[in-house]
Amino acid sequence: MHLYKTSKGNILKEEANYFLLNNDWDTLINQPDLHAHLLQLTSSADSITEEDAENLINNYLLAPIGSQEVWAAGVTYLRSRDARMEESEDTGAADCYQRVYEAERPELFFKSLPHRVAGHKDKVRIRKDSTWNVPEPELTLFINTHGNIQAYTIGNDMSSRSIEGENPLYLPQAKMYERSAALGPCLFITDKPIDLSTAIQMNIYRNGMKMFDDATTLSKMKRTLNELAHWLFKEMDFIHGCFLMTGTCVVPPNEFTLQENDVVNISINGIGVLTNTIAIKS
Ligand code: DO4
Ligand code: MG
């Protein structure tokens, strides 16, 4: 099932049926068993027409986040390890990416507070002091307060490759700035773990022309999703649960950098498409 957050209520799509749930988002999603909870709600919630639901989703959609922090994992795919090693080869820091790729402890970093997160069709930013900018398409987990993965969404971990490539200690500046994270369009809730043969795809358009298009599957990830959740929850409590981006596996060629007004579409089969337009601080 798919759960959309809108400014006029939360829309649950379960098979061909739509329901309007006027519940507080944090309470609604942070359940011990979200799938069972939502199924139970369908018996008492107001069902609405497909037309009304689509109107709300098309015109009032918000990022599917409440008070949760957004965290991210890095270097979870070989493609990401190779890209980091290339961008940092002049600074002698390349080796740290090889080591973290092989280590038991994953790279985990704080990505965003909720108020900095963009939703579907919102603008995301590139930094003015960065010369090499890319979107990172990432399967993103919603993990409840007990540390259990309850839902999936699409994430865009906007990144400055020039700043991180200059020195890995600049990672927070490469990764954390206003509108550097996007989530959406909805939460995908299933009672089974997501199928790792699921495709993740990203394309980028400039002035209507396709500049980049590539895809892979989640099965290429070196680590398991539960392993990433487990490490994040080792010494952290999340009272409303949290979101965890799981790392990128699709990287544009090294000569590519984003420009203002580029349009980035990230799709994950079964979840949907997350679209964002690139902006620069005015
Ligand atoms: O090591 C830097 C971050 C890597 C990352 O964001 C990714 O692999 O997705
Ligand atoms: Mg990333």
Image (cartoon, rainbow, N blue to C red):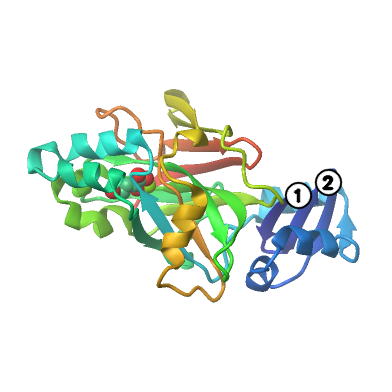
Please indicate whether residue 47 sits to the left or right of residue 78 in the image: right
In the image, 179 versus 33, the foreground residue is 33
Please indicate whether residue 268 sits to the left or right of residue 100 in the image: right
In the image, 185 versus 102, the foreground residue is 102
Label 1 near ligand 2 (CB < 8 Å): no
- Residue name at image x 45 percent, y 47 percent: 156
- Reading the image, the residue beneath label 1 is 55
> Against 232, is 160 above or below?
above
Q: Secondary structure at mark 1?
A: helix
From the top left corner, tell me how far across and down residue 270 is, in percent. 66, 39
- Residue name at image x 45 percent, y 25 percent: 213
- Residue name at image x 68 percent, y 68 percent: 31
Please indicate whether residue 182 sits to the left or right of residue 40 in the image: left
Q: How many marks?
A: 2
Disc 2 packing (10 Å; few <14; some 14–19; many ≥20): few
Q: Residue furthest front?
A: 104
In the image, 29 versus 272, the foreground residue is 29
Q: Give yes or no for contact between labels 1 and 2 (Cβ–Cβ under 8 Å).
A: yes
From the top left corner, tell me how far across and down residue 176 is, in percent. 33, 59
Instruction: Pick the quarter of the image with the C terminus.
Output: bottom left
Q: Is residue 263 visible?
A: yes
Disc 1 packing (10 Å; few <14; some 14–19; many ≥20): few
From the top left corner, tell me how far across and down residue 100 is, in percent. 27, 48
Inter-mark Cα distance, 1 to 2: 6 Å
- Reading the image, the residue beneath label 2 is 51
Label 2 near ligand 2 (CB < 8 Å): no
